[in-house]
Image: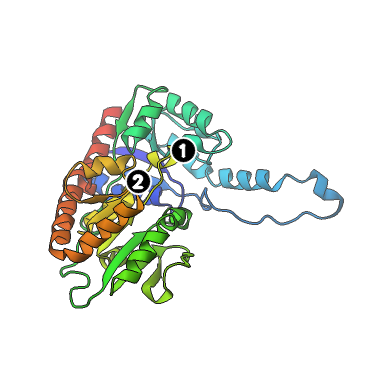
Amino acid sequence: MITVAALTSGKHVPSSRFRVRQHIESLLHFGIHVHEFIPLISKYASFQNSRNSGKNREHAPSPFTLKKSIKIATRIPGLFGSWTSKITWLERELLPGYLTIEPFLKTPYVFDVDDALWLAKPYGSSTAKKIAERSAYVIAGNTYIANWFSSHTKNIKIIPTAIDTSRFTPRTTAANQDTEQFVIGWTGSASNLGYLYDIQDVLSDFIKMHNGAELLVVSDKTPLLSKIPSDRMRYIKWSEQSEVETVQQMDVGLMPLPSNEWTLGKCSFKMLQYMACGLPVIVSPVGMNNDILSMGNVGFSASSKNDWYDALEYLYKHPGNAKELGNTGRLVAEQHFSKEKISGELAALFNGLV
């Protein structure tokens, strides 16, 4: 049995859930036992520090230093866990933008990266470089990430984020076949709502011109979409329990992105969620989105306002063709990104390290 200590970012952090946690059970079938060490405080969490009073204040640690120290302290069990395991699986750096206790982790370790984390302030680039140089492998979520790390290590394996196609499945009937509704869907964290806001104007124009069209937003924060009529926009608060059901309510899935260094590091998981649920997609042709679009006729790329509008118009008017696009997307998800396939790739990597 190969023992692996997985140091992840937090209980509800998507990269922890989908890059590591969803594979733990599958890896057991390959003789690999993964013990996940989840920090008590998510590394992305912000919280208020109690104020110091009186003359002691000038001698107290700064709020930032105190917060950073608390977060690192929650990582100590993972540090000990790495030394009692054969392999360490480090999911991103331990604190965004900083090198902390990574040099003390037992080797060999693999550095799992699914974002352009080298852009994190203040020392993201040097942190990513130092961790990569010491790692046995960098597991890169896409080609763009792999290319950046290629200057710092030769041991790089591209392994995309998996989608559990036994869980994310199409509805047995069309989502809204008994109504005239056409549900335009977007799901994602609040930090990415700005990308949806970028196409708010075209969504507003389309919804106002098409009876039954509405926007469904699934997120951890209520969106501020003032241009969308309130009676044509639904918000469902994200939860792990309902994340599949909410996507299944959609007729088309959107993934708008600007093109920049950060978004090129995106691993298109939102797109894969839609596809696994049998939805046609409309996505910005940025980074890995382009790679997936080239695997099959799964939907449309959209760069301009007219592109977004025309794609929505086509899917609205041609539900049969929309279903075919969704079926192709489902096949692509099963063939290239299923949890079973990706778990096998991870198992091969771990077996090669012992």
Q: Which mark is residue 38?
A: none
Q: From the viewer's side, name the closer residue of 168 and 41.
A: 168
Q: Secondary structure at mark 2?
A: helix
- Mark 1, other Cα within 10 Å: few <14 / some 14–19 / many ≥20: some
Q: Which residue has dot 2 on it?
A: 20
Q: Crowdedness of circle 2 by 10 Å Cα count: few (<14), some, many (20+)?
A: many
Quarter of the image for the C terminus: give it.
top left
| Residue 193 visible here | yes
Which residue type carries mark 1? Leu
Q: At 48% from the left edge and 54% from the top edge, which residue is drawn?
A: 191
The residue lying at 23 percent from left, 76 percent from top is 180
Q: Is residue 307 left or right of residue 134?
A: left
> What type is the residue that disc 2 sits on?
Val
In this view, the residue in front, 191 or 255, is 255
Q: Nearer the viewer, residue 242 or 122?
A: 122
- The percent position of residue 213, horizontal first and vertical second, equals 30, 70
Give the residue at x 35% y 67%: 215
The tag earlier along the polypeptide, 2 or 1, is 2
Q: Which residue is mark 1?
A: 117
The answer to which quarter of the image holds residue 68 is top right
